[in-house]
Amino acid sequence: MAAADSLRDVSSTIPTSVTEVVSGLAAHGYLADEGLATAIFLSLSMKRPLLLEGEPGVGKTEVAKALSALTGGELLRLQCYEGLDASQALYEWDYPRQLLHLRAAEAAGTIGSDTEAVENELYSERFLVRRPLLDAISPRHDVAPVLLIDELDRADDEFEAFLLEVLADNAVTIPELGTFRATTPPIVIITSNRTRDVHDALKRRCLYHWVEHPDLEREIAIVQARIPGANELMARQVARLVAELRSIGLFKPPGVAETIDWVTALTSLGRTSIDGASVDASLGAVVKYREDADRVRAHGIDALVEAAQTAG
Ligand SMILES: Nc1ncnc2c1ncn2[C@@H]1O[C@H](COP(=O)(O)OP(=O)(O)OP(=O)(O)O)[C@@H](O)[C@H]1O
Ligand SMILES: [Mg+2]
């Protein structure tokens, strides 16, 4: 109970049980299973970052968005990529504006009389460009922001080490300005598609959850939550079809995003249930590699459709 009470101090909209996580996220269109909801609850109550790994399109990124909507905390997103460094993640000085300011000071003749004052001004918060990490630990938040560090596996090892340092301290020192410390530490969600392994040192700081594809009923419910008014028969048949496609060894098995797209595509084609011809015609909504499309066709679209139509 102590953990739950301390959570209430931060914000009354922070869920205080696994059930509240499930219902709170569902209210914002995200349908989490028990395992994911438990991981989220523990991450909130233990105030530890949550590392989510899983296949593409299983809802990793969306967790952070739904959590931000649920808690009322600002969503701060850091999209990782190869070559991402501290200045792009934390802060930069606005060099062009500093230069303009300097020129203006020169023109006004103030620079000769008080160089130090001009220099201090140049390195003041006015010329600081805050990036998501600095934003997340700056003391301006009343409600804990949700810091989404998306696709960490795309960033380099050095960035991971740097991130570890920031997350451990919830503080950052900018030489010219001093130390920034979070008064309300962020809720941190880190995602990875596991194109490489995240290092153990970072994993040790985080709680970990592998996000699975949803089961059939949940996937149907997700489609209905995401496409209000979606035809139920169509949602069910497409979800079954996608489940079949996930089992035939495709290079890129479809995620939930593709299920949603496929239902939208087939509905746009005027269908209320699946049939071989329209499934074939709209395959590009769900299979994005030529080899995978060949594999699906070699497997037999009519057989797949028939299985999806007749499955119990
Ligand atoms: N459990 C869920 N509840 C509601 N919507 C979901 C759920 N899972 C996935 N979705 C939907 O599927 C789409 C894809 O989810 P998301 O982008 O979060 O996947 P991802 O795991 O981050 O994929 P990637 O690895 O490609 O970035 C989202 O638009 C979201 O609407
Ligand atoms: Mg994502």
Image (cartoon, rainbow, N blue to C red):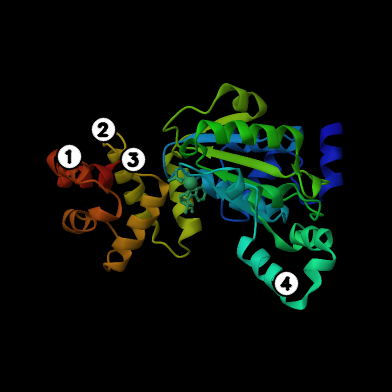
Farthest residue to the front: give it.
Answer: 112
Do callouts 3 and 1 mark residues in contact (Cβ within 8 Å)? no
- The answer to whether the beta carbon of the residue marked 4 is less than 8 Å from any atom of ligand 2 is no
The mark closer to the camera, 2 or 4, is 4
- The answer to whether the beta carbon of the residue marked 2 is less than 8 Å from any atom of ligand 1 is no
Residue where numbered disc 4 is placed: 106
Q: Position of residue 73 (x, y in %)?
A: 72, 54
Do callouts 1 and 2 mark residues in contact (Cβ within 8 Å)? yes
Do callouts 3 and 2 mark residues in contact (Cβ within 8 Å)? no
Quote the CA–CA distance across marks 3 and 1.
15 Å
Quote the CA–CA distance across marks 1 and 2.
9 Å
Which circle's residue, 2 or 4, is located before the other in the chain?
A: 4
Residue where numbered disc 1 is placed: 295
Residue where numbered disc 3 is placed: 243
- Residue 249 is tagged as 2
Q: Position of residue 282 (x, y in %)?
A: 24, 58
Give the residue at x 66% y 35%: 49
